[in-house]
Each structure stands twice: as C-alpha cells, then as structure tokens.
Image: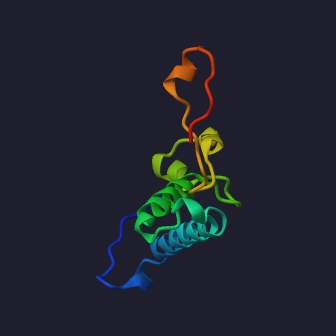
Amino acid sequence: GQSQSFSAVGAQHQNAMAEQAIQTIMYMARTFLIHVSLHWTDRGVDDLALWSFPVKYAAWLYNRLPNRITGLSPIEIATRTKSNHKDLLRTHVWGCPVFVLEPRLQDGKKIPKWNR
C-alpha cells in the first residue's frame, strides 16, 4: 500500500524519492540537449529556450520506462494497470530532424519532390 506523508518546505532530505526522480529527469533532459548540440547544430535546435521541451519528453519517458528489477513503470504503479509498453515504440531521439508527410501524399496521388 501507499501512504501520504508531508515534508517541510525546503527539506529535500525528507522527500528523497521525488528528488531523485526530478534529478534523473533533469539529467535526461540535459543529455538530450547535449546530444542535439553535437549532431544537429545547424538547425538551431540546441537553443536553451527549448529547455521545457526536453524536460517534458524526459518526464514522459521516465514515467513509461519499466524498472529493471520489478518490470513496472511509474505510470503502471500509479494507475495500477499493466502496460504492454507499445507506446515506447513511437519514441524518437529528441531533437532529431523529422519530416511531416503532406496531406497530398496521403490521398494516393503522384508523389512530388520532397520539401524540407
């Protein structure tokens, strides 16, 4: 079972599990930005103004990645449901170039040259 407990303001030592999760998410986001700055600098995706996007993506990943020992993800523990983790198949490297398929191509018409 789970129990609710409260901690004092500014008392990180009382909430070690949450602090560790936040630290892990921030490290993941920082790693995403470093990876982008090393591989795709010409597209301007290594801008620090985009900080909230890798943090959001890191939190999404963190909540869905299963634990090595238990095999359960944080979202499975919170919702008390079992996941098949198929949503992880749609993940990409954060910040990589992505091309969107134009609606004309979805209609089965002749394929024109690609636009970037």
Residue at the right extreme, as displayed: 69
Q: Which residue is at a point 53% across and 42% down the rendered structure image?
A: 81
Q: Is residue 108 left or right of residue 15?
A: right
Q: Between residues 94 and 84, which one lies in front from this camera angle?
A: 94
Count of labels in the image: 0
Residue 68 against residue 107 in the figure, above or below:
below
Q: Nearer the viewer, residue 28 or 2?
A: 28
51 relative to 41 in the view: left or right: left
Q: Residue at x 56, y 57 (%)?
A: 95
Say which quarter of the image contains residue 6.
bottom left
Q: Furthest-top residue in view?
A: 108
Residue 56 rendering spot, x and y as whole percentages: 45, 58
> Where 78 falls versus 45 (above or below)?
above
In depth, the one of 103 and 91 nearer the eye is 103
Q: Which residue in the rendered view is the most extreme toward the left?
A: 9
At horizontal 65% and vertical 69% (from top left) the residue drawn is: 38
Q: Which residue is rendered at x = 56% and y = 42% of the image? A: 116
- The colour style of the image is rainbow
The front one of 10 and 47 is: 47
Q: Position of residue 105 (x, y in %)?
A: 57, 22
